Amino acid sequence: SCEIYRLDPEKPDRRAVERAAETIKRGGLVAFPTETVYGLGADALNPRAAARIFEVKGRPPDNPLIVHVSSLRMARLVAAEIPERALKLVEKLWPGPLTVVLPKSPEVPSVVTAGLGTVAVRMPAHRVALEMIEAAGRPVAAPSANPSGRPSPTSGEHVVRDLDCRVDVILDAGETFFGVESTIVDLTRTPPVLLRPGPIPVEVLEKLLGERVVVPPEARGLRASERPLAPGMKYRHYAPETPLILIDGDPRAVERVIEAAVREAVKARGMRFALAGPDELVDTVASMLLRRGAKPAWIFRLGPLYDTTVAARRLFKTLRRIDEVGAVDVAIILPFPERGIGLAVMNRLRKAASRRVEA
Ligand code: TXA
Ligand code: MG
């Protein structure tokens, strides 16, 4: 059994937050909202509590957790040092959707960092998260609150469904703001390396750092290498049950390949496909397919082509919907431009896709 509290994100009930903080302090698990996605949190300094996170999530033990803090002082406790370079970023971007990878301090148990000498640290910009960490008085280790491999939860409802009360407390504050996970940058390398794109664009990091940030193909979701830069990179992620075929590349080139892709996807008579992607593109492609006698069973408009913040917000909810609407055998996803948060959207789609077709 678990306790579920519904909270106003602007004015969270003090008692519920305290209850969550106490639960963290005594080694329990709390699902909580952040501005990106919901997290599944435990005391980052308690190895047994942190180990429970891996158990509940079904997470491979070699995939480290992000440590959430509510102050710079707390960040100094978990990182061996906060170099000048890191300060340039966190002074401007914390609290916010940025995670920095730094040398780890001995305080952090190795189960949290999966045995690495580094630690990923972030200060979330959500009142509930900040107040809970502050009240607990210790850093909180938390991955996204989904079962390993599945789309991340962007609402309290998702969390309640996903976790099925296998945690002690769930704080439900409705929908999250950004809808995709934080940007992760590795500051232990020179030049810094983008490990995961998120709401903070690379261009912003480069401007604040005054140096180039390397964007490896893995950060675009393009190659699951043998020796991944971040342990999490080698796993398939964010995937619904329904197979996804991603039409990848320049959105303007999609029409050239879409018909063949649909024909290949819909192998048998009676197979039903869903179509999802940028509004404008989905509309033109759907009417083109309709003229050729191929009708999508479902259409999901993710948002405008050139304002990818909307698609980011709707992404994981839509991936879940594709499974829920029923009787969809395969989903065909159309691409977004990789600018700004669009890079994060494409990274998640490539990792979720069972197949990619180059446009
Ligand atoms: O927005 C977010 O970051 C959310 C919310 C809950 O804060 N959290 C999140 O955690 O997305 P998770 O566990 O789903 O993703 C953490 C990623 C993984 O890919 C992991 O491999 C990487 O961070 N990571 C953690 N520690 C690392 C380290 N020391 N070095 C490199 N990568 C690390
Ligand atoms: Mg995750």
Image (spheres, rainbow, N blue to C red):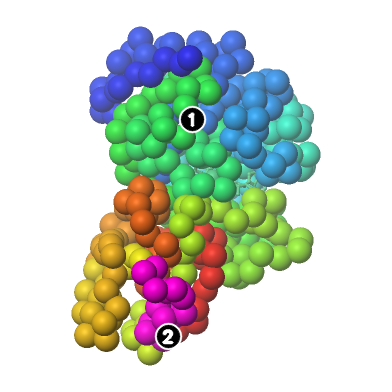
Q: Which residue is mark 1?
A: 163
Residue at mark 1: C-beta within 8 A of ligand 1: no
Q: Residues within 10 Å of mark 1 (few under 14, many from 20)?
A: some
**Residue at (40% x, 78% y) in the render:** 262
Q: Nearer the viewer, residue 169 or 242?
A: 242
- Ligand 1 is found in the corner quadrant, namely top right
From which residue to which does the magenta span run? Answer: 257-271
Q: Is residue 339 above or below residue 200?
A: below
Verify whether residue 259 appears in magenta. yes
Viewer-nearest of labels 2 and 1? Answer: 2
Q: Is residue 345 above or below residue 38?
A: below
Residue farthest toward the bottom in the current orientation of the protein: 256
- Total of numbered circles in the picture? 2
Residue 29 placement (x, y as % from top left): 55, 21
Res 141 quadrant in image: top right
Res 315 quadrant in image: bottom left
**Residue at (76% x, 63% y) in the render:** 226
Disc 1, SS: helix
Residue 297 placement (x, y as % from top left): 28, 65
Q: Give the residue type that dot 1 points to.
A: Leu
| Disc 2 from disc 1: Cα separation | 39 Å
Which quadrant, please, contains the C terminus?
A: bottom left
Q: Nearer the viewer, residue 16 or 1?
A: 1
**Residue at (35% x, 52% y) in the render:** 326
Q: Nearer the viewer, residue 147 or 342?
A: 147
Kindly indicate whether the residue at mark 1 contacts the one at mark 2 (C-beta within 8 angstroms). no
Residue 119 placement (x, y as % from top left): 67, 40
Magenta stretch, main secondary structure class: helix
